[in-house]
């Protein structure tokens, strides 16, 4: 379980300005300290990660639908890079196709969050994801626990 008293360095890759603003507001409300860096497309994300020499993000929230390089391509590149592959990646998207979710799991994403329309639900999901994810976590949960949800999962 991660040390929640320590400040969490979070990287958000999302091209939607409204979503990034809401994400930042949610982080400010959480009961533990956070630092946020934001990139707005896949090329910026990969440049940001490759430029890091010391202060590396504890976790990446990654949108799938971004310009220049999509989130799936970024995830594939991250998990294929020896230096980056231990970065926990939480998929943070509006899509919800089982085939895509299965592929993201196989590619090495840590968790999958479908963006809800309700800000309180979103806050709870982000807090849950950060509670479950430690810095440089390399183990994935079981497939049944990959999709984070506030409702009981259907069998």
Image (cartoon, grey):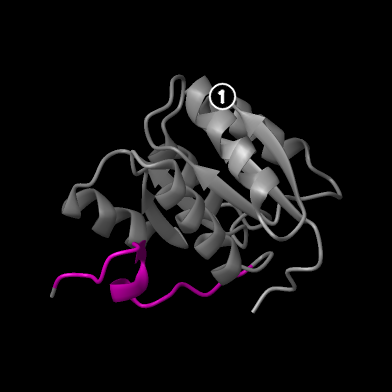
Quadrant of the image occupied by residue 117? top left
Between 155 and 24, the one lying in front of the other is 24
Residue 10 lies left or right of residue 43; in this view the side is: right
Question: Which quadrant is the N terminus positioned in?
Answer: bottom right
Q: Which residue is mark 1?
A: 40
Q: Residue at x 49, y 42 (%)?
A: 62
Left or right, 48 with reference to 140? right
Q: Is residue 35 magenta?
A: no
> At 44% from the left edge and 37% from the top edge, which residue is drawn?
63
Range covered by the magenta-colored residues: 137-154
Quarter occupied by residue 26: top right
Q: Secondary structure at mark 1?
A: loop
Q: Is residue 15 visible?
A: no
Q: Residue at x 58, y 28 (%)?
A: 21
Residue 41 vertical placement versus 143 (above, below): above
Q: Is residue 135 left or right of residue 109?
A: right
């Amino acid at each position: 379980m991660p040390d929640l008293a320590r400040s969490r360095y979070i990287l958000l890759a999302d091209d939607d300005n409204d979503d990034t603003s809401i994400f930042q507001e949610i982080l400010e409300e959480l009961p533990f300290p956070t630092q946020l860096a934001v990139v707005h497309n896949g090329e910026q994300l990969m440049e940001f990660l490759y430029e890091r020499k010391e202060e590396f993000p504890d976790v990446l929230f990654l949108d799938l639908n971004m310009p220049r390089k999509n989130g799936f391509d970024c995830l594939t590149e991250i998990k294929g890079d020896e230096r980056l592959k231990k970065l926990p990646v939480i998929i943070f998207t509006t899509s919800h196709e089982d085939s895509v979710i299965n592929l993201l799991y196989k590619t090495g994403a840590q968790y999958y969050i479908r963006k809800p329309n309700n800000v309180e639900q979103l806050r709870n999901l982000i807090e849950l994801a950060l509670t479950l994810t430690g810095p440089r976590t390399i183990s994935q949960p079981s497939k049944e626990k990959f999709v984070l949800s506030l409702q009981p999962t259907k069998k």
